[in-house]
Amino acid sequence: MTEPTKGYVIVASRTKFFYHSACNLIESIKDFHPDAKCCLVTEEWLLTDRGRAIADDIIFCDNHKRAKIWGMARSPYDLTFYIDADTECEHEDIATVFDEFNGYDVLFTGLPVERHYCYAEVYFPGGTKPDGSKGGFELCGGVCLYDMRNPKVREFMHAWFDLTVEQYAGRWWPKKEDGSEDLDNYPASFKRWDQFSLWWLTNKDERFKDLRVGVIDDDARWNYYSKYKAHLNHNKKPIVIRHYSSSTAKQEVYR
Amino acid sequence: MSYEIQDNAYWEDGIDDRSVVKCIRMHRIDGGRRKEVVTFSRQRPDGSECPDYKEVVQVVGVERIDANTTERRKRKDMERKSAQIKQEQAKKTQMLEKLFHMKLQAFEIPEIANSEDKNLRTRLRRSQNEVEMNAYASLIIGKELGIFKNDGTN
């Protein structure tokens, strides 16, 4: 049996900030893992010599706010680790991420209670657990480890993009029995958030009920938000990916 | 009396001789309640004993006021430390984010973007602060412009 191909997918669309961040991320991955295969998904107008020199594969995407999911669904690698562009690699364990599947098909990082301070909205009525306890988003899409050899995973990635496009365009939202939008259970504030389409597919869509979706072990180290409070020790082992998710900072430098 | 002294009275901060007490008095006015935070010294300016101070000490008790004071000082100390940690954390986050954006800008400088010195590029990317980052950026630019030579001489 041939070994599966392994690689990293980074998507940079719409702004130079994401493009330059993506180039920086790829170089930082290769600093620690020189043999790493990296696929840069970007818009043609953004591509420079730097991008051409460092990316092993280049895929052109459209100017869509969720080009991220479009790019994830088109990974050229069997085992893929998608990473948000506005991050940086800090540790050699980046090479070992493909050992983290632990029987799952798709893995994300989590949104445990102790890290809720970092996220605007987590709970919503429609996410209430069967036992009546509060429920909501439990997965964070900043990074994603997935096995593209599994047709169900491919289908899932395409479905996630398709549903997000419909959601952003205002053509899809959960309905009440009377056919109107169910904004009581699913707040309107989620309408421009791909986190919600991810939640819907992993919790409500029958097609993916057998898909094994999980959270990477010691997940904080694989997507460590710069706003995490270090003294709370969210990560057990050293940080591998640090996430600079600051909208004000993004606007400050690049448009 | 038309008010009730709350039992959380404590000795004023920074004074350890029990000479100043601080408490809350709840007044009943027209069916409602009004909160009054008051501080009393044992002695009035003319040297006479302050009846309000005496009243608070009698109602709440010295032991209780001592215990409240100890508990309050511990809590305030914890709050101060916690606020300090939060402030330091916020500062560090801000510094890291700023550094990240400065690095992105540095890699837009043609001499740095086109440099093939992987070692220096990596060092620049791993810089821990602005000074270190600027130093490596200068080295790369200097080398690319031929100001510095590879053997370290100039």
Image (cartoon, coloured by chain):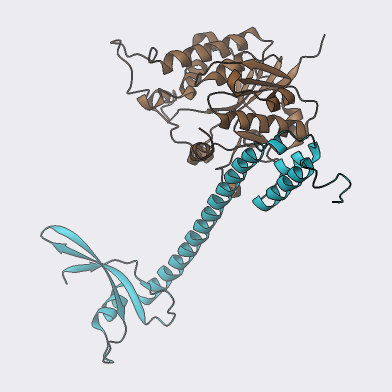
Q: How many marks?
A: 0
Name the residue at the left extreme.
Answer: B30
Residue A157 visible at all: yes
Name the residue at the front extreme.
Answer: B146
Q: Is residue B83 toward the left or the right of residue B3 in the image?
A: right
Image-quadrant location for residue B115 = top right
Where B87 sits versus B12, above or below? above
Residue at 56% in and 18% down:
A69
Residue at 62% in and 31% down:
A20
* Residue A239 x, y percent position in the rendering: 68, 39
Closer to the camera in the image, A80 or B72: A80
State which quarter of the image contains the N terminus of chain B.
Answer: bottom left
Residue at 73% in and 43% down:
B141
Name the residue at the right extreme.
Answer: B151
Q: Is residue B150 toward the left or the right of residue A159 in the image?
A: right
Closer to the camera in the image, A28 or B66: A28
For chain B, what colour was chosen? cyan
Where B34 sits versus A194, above or below? below
Q: Is residue A159 toward the left or the right of residue A27 in the image?
A: left
The chain shown in brown is which?
Answer: A
Residue A234 visible at all: no
* Residue A107 x, y percent position in the rendering: 62, 23
Image-quadrant location for residue A241 = top right
Where B52 sits versus A198, above or below? below
Where A122 sits versus B41, above or below? above
* Residue A140 x, y percent position in the rendering: 55, 28
Closer to the camera in the image, A178 or A53: A53
* Residue A156 x, y percent position in the rendering: 57, 12
